[in-house]
Amino acid sequence: MKSLSIKAHAPRLTRGWLNDGVNDLRRRSIPILVARFAAAGLGAAVLAHAEGGLIAVGWTTALIVAEIWTWLSCFPRQAPRPLPRRGLIGYVCSIAWMTFVWTILALLLWNPGAHALQLAVFCLLTGQMAHAQAFSARSRLMLLMVGGMPAAMLLALCLVGTDLPLAERAIVTIATVVMIAYFLRASQATRRQSEALEASRAEAVAASDAKTAFLALMSHELRTPMTGVLGMAKALESGPLNQHQRHQLGILLQSGEGLLAHLNDILDISKVEAGRLQLEAVPFNLVDKINRVREVWSQIAESKQVGLTFTLEPPQPPWLIGDPTRIRQIMINLVSNALKFTDTGEVVVAVTVSPIGATHAKVVIAVRDTGIGIAPEQQRRLFEPFTQADVSVTRRFGGSGLGLSICRSLAEAMDGEVDLVSVLGEGSTFTLRLTLPLAADQEPAPAAPAARSIAGLRVLVVDDNAVNRLVVETLLNALDCETRAESDGLAALQALEAEEFDAVLMDIHMPGMGGTEALQAIRAGAGGPARDIPVIALTADILEGAAEKLLRAGFDAVQPKPVAIDTLAVCLADLSEARIRRYLRGPIPLE
């Protein structure tokens, strides 16, 4: 019965020892091959001098066999995919044979009368034990093999392999035992530290994942009510208002958009800290980005009676390759800060594009203002998150202190930089420097098509939030669309079976049947014959990759919350025209 018990537990024990870092180690065996061959050449030369060429040739042959065995066990399987159990056993056996060959070299070189060779053997065996320390944090089995054989050989040579007097032999043996004990203690300490570091890394990854999940949840929970605030304000803006009401509504819209901007800043800085910021590399025209920034801030500058001037050199720069959205974001942040802290005078945005050879260009965007300026001691920490010049600035001008930190992080992500020159009381100049590849000259963009009417479209709005349903319906009704609203995916399927619609606006996170599940049911025919109806995802999740994930799930388009009615109208018009073209083409004829 005892032998049966041992057989039953043997595979489990073997599997546990084999899985203890062996795969990680075998991927590291090949890079140190040259160093092992150099040491082998030196050992063979010493052995040939001490014992003769024949023994040296035999030992070298055994070592070559060990190296080939190890090489076959490691290569070409250096990918992260683990080896099967048989492959792991083969690799472990090759390392055991390799260690045995080197330990035998120590035994062959040991000569009780040759103190120089004894010292060389001592260095060889202790070197093997030191080399085994590299395995202590990864694999106990490899540590036992690589360090255990030389330790046992060293202890045996001290006990019976020397002609020292008994007292001196005892001293040497005790010293060897102490060294081996220290070797074991150091191995255990190294392994504990490695396990603690791995646990800390796992905790950091878990904390980062939890932070990302929290931000996604907060993005949804905060942007959902913002849809109601900004959507209803936009709906009111299109109605009849007197001057006082329009002024109050403008304040409401400005405050809501400011809150939304702060939310976006927090998400951006979190993506930067988590290393999940993704940049585009697409051709773009810098002139278009400058014009859009001018459009955003010219009215605000005019209301403050502050001059806002843009200069571009050359006037028609070449097309560039980069992330135009992030570059525009940096420009908007810098111009926003300049206007915020400038009460009189002007803000000048000077853009220069200088070619670097035939493939790249140096882009310098300098934003100069005549505002309050920044003291030298405050400039050093100005680019840190949640930092402003001082508390009085925060009280007077507001802001989260994230804008400049985001600007610098974005610039560094694009291998650029943002620097500052400022004189207290005279103004500041923030300069963005980027080196971007040149793009092939692009054809001039066609003129924007005339606004297309979506009047008469029948749109099904599906959202579990009653305010969001009301907002979207109000905005679409203002464009003469017919709407019906439902609160979950199951009700949407019933509505599609009962009526005909031209498009569906589908929230993603809903109780019962969610948006993605409802889409799959529609495409499977559960909503009646309209299985090819355009379905647009409405989502408050704006984290990196969220829109692409929804498109891969089968949605025809994605609209972030708060809903921008102009963008939604264009999206509906495009999808409606595409659907009409499909119907006009008719079914594909059979061969």
Image (cartoon, rainbow, N blue to C red):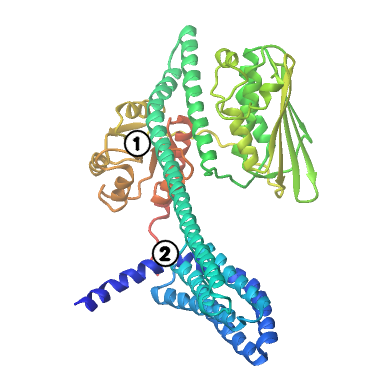
Of 238 and 447, nearer the camera is: 238
**Under tag 1, what secondary structure?**
strand
Q: Using residue 527 as the reference point, say whether residue 587 is left or right of it.
A: right
**Which image quadrant: the C terminus?**
bottom left
Q: Which residue lies at the image location 79% right of the left edge and 44% below the top edge?
A: 355
Return the mark for residue 275.
none
Dot 2 surroundings within 10 Å: few (below 14), some, or many (20 or more)?
some
Q: CA distance from mark 2 to mark 1?
A: 59 Å
Residue 100 spot, x, y in % from top left: 52, 79
Residue 425 spot, x, y in % from top left: 72, 13
Which is more foreground, mark 2 or mark 1?
2
Q: Which residue lies at the image location 57% right of the left edge and 71% below the top edge?
A: 168
Using the rendered image of the protein, determine whether residue 351 is visible from the camera's viewpoint: yes
Of 378 and 469, nearer the camera is: 378
First of labels 2, 1 by sequence position: 2
Query: Which residue, given by chain and number where applicable, does mark 2 sit on?
Result: 20
Of 116 and 493, nearer the camera is: 116
- In the image, residue 333 above or below residue 396: below
Q: Which residue lies at the image location 57% right of the left edge and 12% below the top edge?
A: 396
- In the image, residue 176 above or below residue 431: below
Q: Using residue 585 as the reference point, say whether residue 415 is left or right of it.
A: right
Of 347 and 118, nearer the camera is: 118
**Under tag 2, what secondary structure?**
loop
**Which image quadrant: the N terminus?**
bottom left
Residue 38 spot, x, y in % from top left: 67, 75
Query: Which residue, given by chain and number where applicable, does mark 1 sit on?
Result: 459
- In the image, residue 428 above or below residue 173: above
Using the rendered image of the protein, determine whether residue 576 is visible from the camera's viewpoint: no
Amino acid type for the residue under numbered disc 1:
Val
Instruction: Single out the residue that lies furthest toward the left.
Output: 1
